Amino acid sequence: MPATYPTYPSREQFARYLANYRSVLGLRVEYRSLVAGMAPSQAAGGGWAVDVARLDGASRKRFVARNVIFANGVYNDALLPPLQGKERFCGKIVHSSRYTNATDLGWANGKRVLVVGWGNSGSEIALDLVEHGARPTLLARSPQVVVPRDHLQVAQRLLHSHLNPLLALPFGWLALLPVLLLTDPVLKLAARIKYGGSLARAGLPQHWKGPLLRLLTEGVPPMMDVGTVQACIDGRIAVRREGLAGIDADGRVVFSDGSAEPFDGIVLATGYHLFSGHRHFLDAASLQRLGTGKEAIKTGSVVPGCELRLPNVWALFGRLQMIRDAAPALGRRIARRVHGGSRWRGAASWVWWVVEHVLIAWAVLAARRRLKQKARQLR
């Protein structure tokens, strides 16, 4: 992005960047279209037949490609919890993926809106509602790891600028462990200094894990605070800890403690089905082989910049920094596959991987032997 852009570019700036990117590289982009089907091509050259349909139904095209990249992310289909009696609710009920702003939805100027969930989407939506004059209530049941966005941005920059060069060196991946052990306590200490006990006073439950530890073990990113916590402390955002029971006969929202309140709208910031977008267009046999959801991710079949369990089908997703790092290597892999480049470089990397781990095992065993010798001498 241009150096003149701020750390967090606006929607208009990001759209302008994408338009310039398309123009400079001469990319062909199909706007207002979706992938309606994808299956192995029956043509002589093989590859994949991809059907693309216009959203207005005006036309449908078929592309035959030797390589296909899934760049639609891993957070695909909206996860909608059951809400008993929702047909009795007189206002709008939208998932966070469909949220635009309070004015477009008719919730500005004093309207009461319930935001279910306080992850990144729910927290930012609640703050946007406040800024548009609405009166939001944040339903915060599950504990979150709260990190000020500026602090997390500093940590990401340091990790990206200092850790990536280390990973290119032999045994450089060993630097990951001390970095992870140090980063989490530092971020938690910074959050403690900034918020003190105000999170508990505001009724926001905190998770005991650090941001990176929870991301690695549960796949849940930290809540990057952009002002929501302060709005909860000030009372501009009401906080409730109860569960959502349903809608009563009068159209009020009923909570798990039996209390009920009237609202003009509900935002369900309840997350997504992971890695599920391809189930809407992939043929049955390929879908069964690739899988969906957390299980497909856990088995290692979904890695940014790598080939999936389908031939010549690749994945590219994640934060912009991850995409920036993975995209060049992915491009080289596809180029070698298409143009038949040399495979010696790939073979050499595997040989070095084996040598590296053999040396590590030898060093560990040698250290154990020395420790045993010293223990016998002390006896």
Image: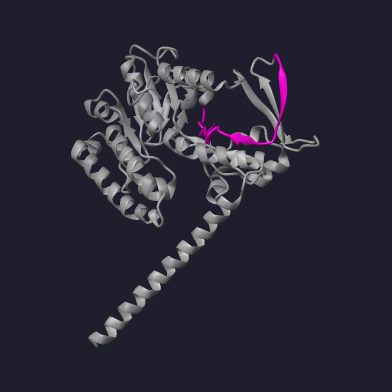
Percent from the top left, x then y, of residue 71? 55, 33
Percent from the top left, x then y, of residue 142? 37, 40
Specify whether residue 77 is painted magenta.
yes
Where 294 sits versus 26, above or below? below
In this rendered view, identify the residue nearer to me: 367 or 39. Answer: 367
As drawn, is 347 to the left or to the right of 207? right
Number of labelled discs? 0
As drawn, is 167 to the left or to the right of 237? right
In this rendered view, identify the residue nearer to me: 304 or 131. Answer: 304
Percent from the top left, x then y, of residue 246? 47, 30
The quarter of the rendered structure image containing the N terminus is top left
As drawn, is 13 to the left or to the right of 75? left
In this rendered view, identify the residue nearer to me: 74 or 256. Answer: 74
**Residue 367 shows in this picture:** yes
Percent from the top left, x then y, of residue 170? 41, 56
As drawn, is 364 to the left or to the right of 301? left
The quarter of the rendered structure image containing the C terminus is bottom left
Quadrant location of residue 225? top left
**Residue 264 shows in this picture:** no
Specify whether residue 68 is painted magenta.
yes
Which residues are drawn in magenta?
Answer: 58-85
Type of colouring = one colour
In this rendered view, identify the residue nearer to me: 214 or 133. Answer: 214
Identify the residue at image location x=30%, y=28%: 226
